[in-house]
Amino acid sequence: MIETLLVANRGEIACRVFRTCRELGIATVAVYADPDEGALHTREADAAVRLPGAAPAATYLRGDLIVKAALAAGADAVHPGYGFLSENADFAREVVDAGLTWIGPPPDAIEAMASKTRAKELMRIAPLDAGTVTDADLPLLVKAAAGGGGRGMRVVRELDALKDELAAARAEALSAFGDGEVFVEPYVEGGRHVEVQILADAHGTVWALGTRDCSLQRRHQKVVEEAPAPGLGEELTARLEEMAVRAARATGYRGAGTVEFLVVGDRAHFLEMNTRLQVEHPVTEAVFGVDLVALQIRVAEGAVLPPAPPARRGHAVEARLYAEDPSRSWSPQTGTLHALSFPAGGGPGPTRGDGASGTPAPRAWTRVDAGYGDGDRIGVHYDAMIAKVVVWAPTRREAVRRLAGDLARARIHGPVTNRELLVRSLRHPEFAEARMDTGFYDRHLPALTGAADGEELAALAAALADAAARRAGGDAAGTTARLGGWRNLPSQPQVKRYRGRDTEHEVRYRFTRDGVRAEDFPGVRVRRAAPDAVRIETDGVEKEFRIAVYGDDRVHVDTPTSAHTLTRLPRFPDPTAQREPGSLLAPMPGTVVRVAEGIAPGATVTAGQPLVWLEAMKMEHRITAPASGTLTALHAAPGRQVEVGALLAVVQAAAQEEHPS
């Protein structure tokens, strides 16, 4: 029996495994790199061991250090989570050779399937030869042989770009997984990403735990997942499950794993087998009423699975909340997560029954798996996922509606997130009708990332809350500034300025005998104003705005149906705070990993040409020339650490260049 378990991972998955361990009475050990000192997963573990350093290659990818940490902490088992070393056969062998229990498949099975190139060989599917592909083979997909999560993947639509994309994919894969092997395969567009969860014991039993649809993806990384995959049909579902079980038996598999397919019509194309737990495993847990981590542990202890899994029930949908800005090329965001809370859910475990004869009807519930808590800092070194929000309901329609509502009502204060994108995606007709495919965001991203309605009213509410706080002497404990209390104040207009997502707002209001009057907001009446809440009536409809201020300038405004983040601006902007036209600024803190070959000040560049590559949160981000012209300055160099807003280069547009008369 396992008594103490170390999780060789961080963030959300480590916290999730620790939760099951507590329920099973198993002691827990965390490992952490220096940027994760004091992180949520270290606080939730019974013990923690430091891995000195910051880069994954020096910490979470060092199997020898992790095994040493397990032994030092008295652990007798290791769970790899997902990502990092979870599909590394050599690490699994190190764990076993040290006398520890490995919570995962046998190393030989990992070796057979964790490398996508070897998995395709096993399934008799040959990848393309990158050296011989032609225009007829386009579009192509460059893919990392190890790992997953969309890292090391690039779509190539022009042969001239293949060399650079191979290099970028190799660098990203090496950084994320410690393995730079990549391969090339045809890129199939317009398909659905469907996968089958399997679980196998050491006694010959293999479960196929239904299907999941993971078609909503950005940069080949999943964003929204659900179980079961809607609209597949019984025959196709049975075929997918049979193929998954066959793959597991062919490798002598043991533990949890996932077989992934691209489905076009009634045809299924094998993609890969992930020899680990998947990020989206909670939706399968929800519809089958199981704990996959508990089952992983029991299988590792030698338990025998029942002949068949429990019956599937209802529908579950999961959304991944990321610290990123989808409207700006999905750029990762960093900073302090001041608040993270969701409407109260019913807790996992739907009531069994159909509502007839006094039997309770199934009740929807929400589950949140988070990797950060209030006050935690989201840094640049690791994945940008903050949390996963999972909803189970009797039907797909109910699950989707509740998940969208929970996300809309959540209080998420800190860096920019993809929350608004998630809500709009779930409410989009194409998703609601289960007509989505992997090209969903290619088609709909502009519409899904436009400015949210109501930002002007949010700015008004922020201004009035600020006035209430000042009136109350800065007391933000909920003191209400009654409208009548302002009657004797001067009547000249008060002015405050805020910057929203894309627009600046100048709010003018004055205090009168009849209360607060916002002259630029016809039809608007202020019913109540306090430092933390403002109630506004618009054309007869009242709405509450909840206000939270962090630091001197960051303001979060929440309503029951929307959320806005504003930056308080000085009334008179500093005219010297200007950048030279054509300045390329770092969109996030990170490390310069590459500079375009052969460029230097004076070089001619073309619009859209990649000039600098930044690595942040284990992903590479290109900084491109904003216009055709001349590179007049280059401040980026490989290995340089930069903060957000740092000047990387300057491109003088051709129209701005001086010409001799």
Image (cartoon, helix red, strand yellow):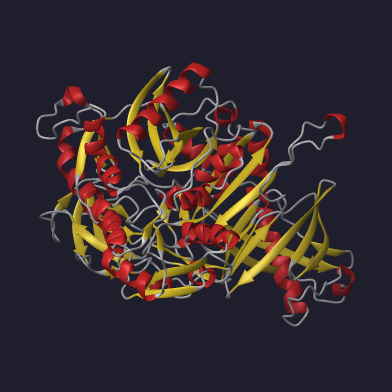
User: Does 176 sit above or below residue 121?
Assistant: below
Give the residue drawn at x 74%, y 80%. 475
**Residue nearer the viewer, 72 or 129:** 72
User: Does 618 sit above or below residue 475?
Assistant: above
Question: Does residue 143 appear in this view?
Answer: yes
Q: Position of residue 463 (x, y in %)?
A: 69, 66
User: Does 637 sit above or below residue 304?
Assistant: below
Residue 354 found in image quarter? top right
**Residue nearer the viewer, 648 or 88:** 88
Q: Position of residue 36 (x, y in %)?
A: 42, 71
Q: Position of residue 336 (x, y in %)?
A: 51, 69
**Residue nearer the viewer, 585 or 440:** 440
Q: Position of residue 657 (x, y in %)?
A: 21, 54
Give the farthest residue toward the bottom. 473
Question: Does residue 157 appear in this view?
Answer: no
Residue 77 found in image quarter? bottom left
Give the residue drawn at x 80%, y 66%. 529
Q: How many marks?
A: 0
Give the residue drawn at x 38%, y 50%. 104
